[in-house]
Amino acid sequence: MPQSYPPYEPSAEPAESLQDVVKGHRLDAAQEWLETHPPHVIADELARMDAVDAVVAFRLLHKDQALAVFEELEPVDQQPILEGLRDRSFLDLIEGMDPDDRARMLREAPAKVVKRVLAGLSPHERRMTSALLGYPEGSVGRYMTPEVVALAQDLTVEQALRTVRAKGADAETVYTLPVVDSGRRLTGIVELRELVLNPPDMMISKLVVTEPTSAYATDSAEQAARLMRETNDLNLPVVDSEDRLVGLFTIDDAVEVIEAADTEDVARQAGAAPWAGHYMAASVWQLARYRALWLSLLLVAATLTVGVTRAFEATLEQVAALALFIPMLIGAGGNAGAQAATACVRALAVGEVRGSDLLKVIWRECRVGLVLGSLLALLGLVVGTMVVSAKIALVVGITLVLICGWAATIGGTMPLLAKRLRIDPAVVSAPMVTTLVDATGLVIYFLTAKAVLGV
Amino acid sequence: MPQSYPPYEPSAEPAESLQDVVKGHRLDAAQEWLETHPPHVIADELARMDAVDAVVAFRLLHKDQALAVFEELEPVDQQPILEGLRDRSFLDLIEGMDPDDRARMLREAPAKVVKRVLAGLSPHERRMTSALLGYPEGSVGRYMTPEVVALAQDLTVEQALRTVRAKGADAETVYTLPVVDSGRRLTGIVELRELVLNPPDMMISKLVVTEPTSAYATDSAEQAARLMRETNDLNLPVVDSEDRLVGLFTIDDAVEVIEAADTEDVARQAGAAPWAGHYMAASVWQLARYRALWLSLLLVAATLTVGVTRAFEATLEQVAALALFIPMLIGAGGNAGAQAATACVRALAVGEVRGSDLLKVIWRECRVGLVLGSLLALLGLVVGTMVVSAKIALVVGITLVLICGWAATIGGTMPLLAKRLRIDPAVVSAPMVTTLVDATGLVIYFLTAKAVLGV
């Protein structure tokens, strides 16, 4: 349904936030604010507000606007609003949502809400929603739209357009039209564009892309989304295990899946648990909780460094100057390892590297690390000589070459090993590599010192 | 143009790679390989191969397939292939490309190639390509398609569809139809879907979304792409400074812009220079080059830690056990800082946090850091007591609280400060925060030790 929104300038910051207006109980001003902002901006503001204020503001929305705003919210932000609505508005809202958006919301809802939602739906909508909820989490089935206009194979362009007109009103998209045989098995797709641009009496079989790229409903949504980005398809037909058409995975959902996956990878890379909420809406306790586990594990792992330093305490006492370079050396190793790990995790995520490339990647990263280490060694020699002595500088230089080579190798190996073991490579976070390299790097340092200085 | 590709299973790895076949000079096998794989898979294989092999393989492609594969390649991978083609195939290829893809390729091409390409184009195509090249790098203008079917405001649905049929064949998309006034100023958009689903004699003014979301051609492509992801639009109309329609930014390009921006942010976050190429195609020297600058800068910055340790050498000599905990403490601080920095950089990138949130973010992260530090302090007390003594353990515990609070504050502050100074927040890499926190963390450690132990 076409709607009209005021022009929106993405770089401008709102003069007064919705939150300020609502907090001040100025409901007229709030109403005006809501009327002059597009749904995605309103949704963003609601996500930043606490639940009570958000519900107050949400209730001020017109019915159509409410649906548009609600669909822009992340599932985690939809919950409190839904719980704060009275029956009538509640039903309008959930009956108006697309089945895939509804299923995604319910996925994270408490059982009580799921029950209330399903009870409020018409039988047809309920059936579709339940079907989507039957697919595993993170699968294409959870994200696809089941309302698809499918065409028979033997139509003319005119007949096909008539089908689109008859059945298209409820469908989320009519731009990609799957073509199916009598058993509803997917045999091809035709674009609406082709139907519009070609003569009415042409057979659509001439316009059909046969054997199109498709996904199984149980496939990973992230993989399917990245596949769409590569093939530049607007919609990906989704089939069941018997190749029967069950839905379409639309590009707008694919973009969200990619962005969510990237956000998740980024969080994992920094050694934090991924979460789906809005940064500004999370409480201090929540933020701390997402980071606490990894931070504690890393600290425990870091006690290894205490052990290593202890084992070489005699060396350290003999040559106290060695202590001066510990932070710098393990820092350099950590950085080199983090660079390699991050590059490999990303290359795996976007499909440039596969699990089978393990040996090639190890060999590449090992050499990259040695090259970088040699460069740093030159710097290390200068600093070491200036601060202490040429002999200590030599120890620092050699250590830098070895640490960087070792760190890059580890950083490149771990994500690919994880991939082979079917663990998400992104859990091989930069901090994890850094911590591992810290302890082993100290061993390299002290052994080099013993060898060069003969202590 | 509809084309038929064999079914493709994304999770399956190719049994024999194109590279192996070409390296073995088995051209028949190569031809068969090319015929049985879709364009994006072929493009991925070509990107992994060295230039000479890639050209050999590319020449084996049929004309239509060649164009499809070529358009899937990144600009950096297109160069060597273009240079290896003879005139006829060269011209076919560039004349067949969409103007925006062509402009993007030329952006990174040497002057010689740009000249050869522009000389080979028809005047019409040349004009469009030159126009796109006139927009700044990274702007929407560089990515938009200038071939748009625009509609006048006073048409009926039937008349509008006739315009689409007459002018749509060359356009990259006809799904979003911008509506313009007599001065070609954008006044609205109408979706092809609405034209197809509504009666022929209806006036399109009833279906038009007035004042649609749009972007200026000089706007940042990344911002426009993220805006599209929020509004779920398939295409974003692009206007010049006088609001005249100049093109459409299509969702497939938006997805690529988002993915490239995320890859860039990820590289920057790990302290490496971002680059556009394929991981497996980059040489060891290239990979080293992208990482060398930051790694060296960080090492130089890390010499600060040498200075700090030196300044407290007396304390360290008095209580040698303090050295044992240096790697663990600065590691914990670095990790806490990296978590905060990464969370804030991502929140800025996806628009959850704005530059004006600086003070709020500082206050949040400071508290999060103190909470996490208190948790780690408990672990630190246990480890410290076990390894050395209760007194040293107390020093370690207090230091952990302070270091984590400080590190999280710095990690949260720096990206937002960068944003305010109009620097890409992603350059505030985790290693940068870590290095900064290393030196200041040591100061905190030694000062705490002096205070508690009274040395």
Image (spheres, coloured by chain):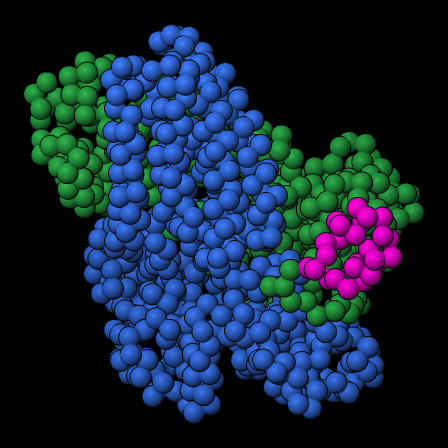
Chain colours: A green, B blue
Query: From what the image shows, is residue A78 above or below residue B156?
Result: above
Residue at (79%, 85%) from the top-left corner? B156
Horizontal side of A167 relative to A197 (left or right) equals right
Query: From what the image shows, is residue B56 above or below residue B97?
Result: above
Q: Position of residue B254 (x, y in %)?
A: 54, 63
Q: Position of residue B429 (x, y in %)?
A: 41, 46
Let me know if residue A191 is in the magenta part. Answer: no
Q: Tell me the magenta residue range.
A: A14-38
Count every numbered label the image shows and give the total. Answer: 0
Q: Quadrant of residue A422?
A: top left
Q: Which is more toward the observer, B48 or B225?
A: B225
Q: Position of residue B249 (x, y in %)?
A: 56, 71
Q: Quadrant of residue B60?
A: bottom left
The quadrant of the picture occupied by the N terminus of chain A is bottom right
Horizontal side of A68 relative to B335 (left or right) equals right
Q: Which is more toward the observer, A38 or B119?
A: A38
Q: Position of residue B376 (x, y in %)?
A: 49, 21
Q: Which is more toward the observer, B282 or B287?
A: B287
Residue at (18%, 13%) from the top-left corner? A314
Residue at (22%, 45%) from the top-left corner? A372
Residue at (18%, 39%) from the top-left corner? A383
Q: Quadrant of residue A209?
A: bottom right
Query: From what the image shows, is residue A300 above or below residue A412?
Result: above
The quadrant of the picture occupied by the C terminus of chain A is top left
